[in-house]
């Protein structure tokens, strides 16, 4: 039988006094509502204990940073932090302050470096499958049910948000069952049949089919009872109870939302979509909302660290909307933040920098590789005889990088933005490749390693700036490193430890008490 122990009571009082003195009001709220084990650990103890779980949440937010592992998060924290020599310190982003953190492995049934289709299937249904397959088991025939579908069956409302096209692999894995992630039209047809309550973000790929001979998916969605909005004005008119697909008014590459670094004031942000989603979905029976920041992955594929960092910051702003909701309903809300896999083999530290980093250099980057590609192609179109010397002013304006005439090999350069002779040769070779028609560019092992299929000049510029800042990459594809799982709210204690990504599905099912 438990007996009152004065020494233990005084110890707990001391811990809570430390929490009150050390943590900000928001952090106090996180500690207060965390699992008791996490409360002790937050105050600096390594003590842990088994304590009964809280009641089931009514509201579950699942945030997925596509391509986001620990390093993408830390890169954003270093960028936001103090980079002054002798005072370096990262600034933690909001979900890094969550009281419970776990680690999940990401392999699928075919690779330790999986794709988004299979990993999203693992997260959404607890099922391992082949890379490229959505919502089917390894036989590529048997369909699986997802957490979103089960939530809908339990009379919860369901929202799916993504910064990329909504029939792309990760969002699609919460409702679709297809052998190939490239079956965009079929995924769109299945989207219209879900009866989910709120879709938002990018547009749809292959809206009229691969051969452009099918009925427009927007029309099919409207016939299924969805209001499809394509302007900010119409988006702002969406109200609680609407069944809606809200499409970004301004679209960028492949029908996605613009990168955070490229957004203008009139653009609808991921945070806007989360805030509106809460308004639409909030009801007494609760809701499930999946939010994907899909372009973290796309920027990592392109090895564009500046754009990646801004995407993570935009993701943080979206998560802030969920935290604000949690603060109003702390006993009824669960927020999970994770990644589906890592992309690019991002590292903090580069061979040319020794033990130093210079993340403040990233501040000079003014746009993503996509917008620079567009600008460069416009320059080529207006001047087919374009010279590198003509482009240098644009390069300095966009990336801060400068060319100093006649820099000698190995010469010490005081200004870190000035290109070394080696870097200038890299840029010159990349410019020459970029001036060729795309189908005439060299396809060698060397160009594959240097450019990865991207516009040679853009990827070379981001590589040079990244390396100067102390950032490295190993790949243009996915890697096999585990990802973090951050949890806040009701049943958050269930998400600590080291486990497989399929376990996240089963943990969510337990949290919501679904079968």
Image: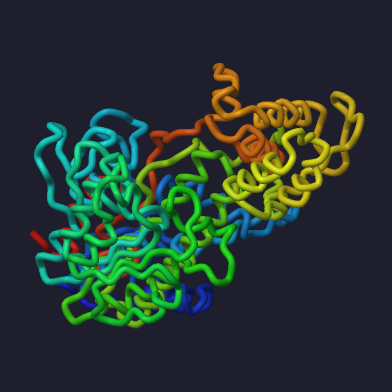
As drawn, which residue projects farthest toward the top?
A: 444
- Residue 138 horizontal/vertical position (percent): 16, 33
Q: Residue 35: tell me if it is visible.
A: no
Hey, which quadrant is residue 122 in on the image? top left
Residue 303 left/right relative to 268: right
- Residue 49 horizontal/vertical position (percent): 27, 60
Residue 68 left/right relative to 54: right
- Residue 191 horizontal/vertical position (percent): 22, 56
Residue lying at 14% horizontally and 66% vertically, measured from the top left: 152
Residue lying at 42% horizontally and 35% vertically, measured from the top left: 478
Work out whether residue 61 or residue 12 is closer to the camera in this orientation and state it: 61
Hey, which quadrant is residue 92 in on the image? bottom right
Hey, which quadrant is residue 210 in on the image? top left
- In which quadrant of the rendered image does the N terminus lie? bottom left
Residue lying at 30% horizontally and 35% vertically, measured from the top left: 107
- Residue 468 horizontal/vertical position (percent): 71, 40
Residue 52, above or below 105:
below
- In which quadrant of the rendered image does the C terminus lie? bottom left
């Amino acid at each position: 039988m438990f007996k009152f122990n004065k020494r233990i009571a005084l110890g707990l009082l001391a811990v809570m006094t430390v929490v009150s003195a050390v943590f900000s009001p928001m952090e106090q709220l996180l500690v207060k509502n965390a699992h008791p084990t996490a409360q002790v650990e937050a105050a600096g103890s390594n003590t842990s204990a088994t304590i009964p779980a809280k009641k089931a949440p009514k509201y579950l937010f699942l945030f997925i940073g596509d391509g986001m592992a620990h390093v993408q998060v830390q890169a954003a924290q270093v960028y936001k932090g103090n980079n002054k020599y002798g005072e370096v310190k990262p600034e933690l982003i909001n979900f890094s302050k969550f009281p419970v953190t776990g680690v999940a492995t990401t392999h699928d049934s075919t690779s330790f470096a999986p794709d988004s289709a299979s990993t999203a299937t693992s997260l959404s249904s607890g099922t391992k499958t082949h890379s490229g397959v959505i919502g089917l088991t390894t036989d590529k025939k048997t369909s699986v049910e997802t957490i979103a579908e089960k939530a809908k069956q339990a009379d919860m409302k369901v929202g799916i948000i993504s910064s990329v096209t909504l029939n792309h692999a990760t969002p699609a894995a919460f409702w679709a069952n297809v052998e190939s992630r490239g079956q965009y039209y079929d995924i769109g047809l299945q989207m219209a049949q879900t009866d989910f309550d709120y879709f938002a973000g990018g547009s749809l790929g292959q809206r009229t089919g691969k051969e452009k001979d099918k009925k427009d998916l927007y029309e099919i969605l409207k016939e299924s009872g969805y209001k499809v909005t394509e302007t900010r004005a119409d988006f702002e008119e969406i109200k609680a109870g609407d069944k809606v697909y809200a499409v970004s008014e301004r679209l960028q590459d492949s029908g996605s939302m613009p990168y955070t670094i490229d957004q203008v004031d009139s653009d609808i942000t991921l945070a806007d979509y989360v805030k509106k989603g809460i308004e639409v979905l909030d009801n007494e029976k609760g809701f499930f909302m999946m939010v994907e920041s899909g372009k973290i992955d796309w920027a990592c594929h392109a090895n564009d660290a500046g754009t990646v960092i801004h995407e993570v910051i935009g993701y943080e702003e979206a998560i802030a909307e969920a935290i604000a909701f949690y603060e109003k309903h702390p006993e009824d809300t669960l927020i999970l933040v994770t990644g589906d896999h890592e992309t690019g083999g991002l590292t903090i530290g580069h061979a040319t920098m020794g033990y130093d980093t210079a993340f403040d250099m990233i501040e000079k980057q003014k746009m993503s590789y996509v917008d620079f590609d567009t600008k460069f192609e416009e320059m080529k179109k207006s001047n087919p005889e374009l010279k590198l010397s003509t482009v240098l002013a644009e390069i300095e304006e966009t990336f801060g990088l400068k060319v100093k005439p006649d820099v000698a090999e190995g010469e010490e350069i005081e200004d870190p933005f000035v290109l070394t002779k080696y870097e200038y040769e890299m840029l010159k070779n990349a410019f020459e490749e970029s001036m060729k028609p795309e189908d005439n560019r060299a396809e060698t092992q060397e160009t594959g390693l240097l450019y990865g299929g991207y516009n040679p000049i853009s990827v070379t510029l981001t590589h040079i700036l990244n390396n100067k800042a102390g950032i490295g990459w190993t790949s243009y594809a996915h890697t096999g490193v585990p990802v973090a799982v951050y949890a806040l709210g009701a049943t958050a204690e269930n998400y600590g430890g080291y486990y497989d990504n399929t376990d996240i599905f089963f943990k969510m099912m337990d949290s919501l008490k679904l079968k």
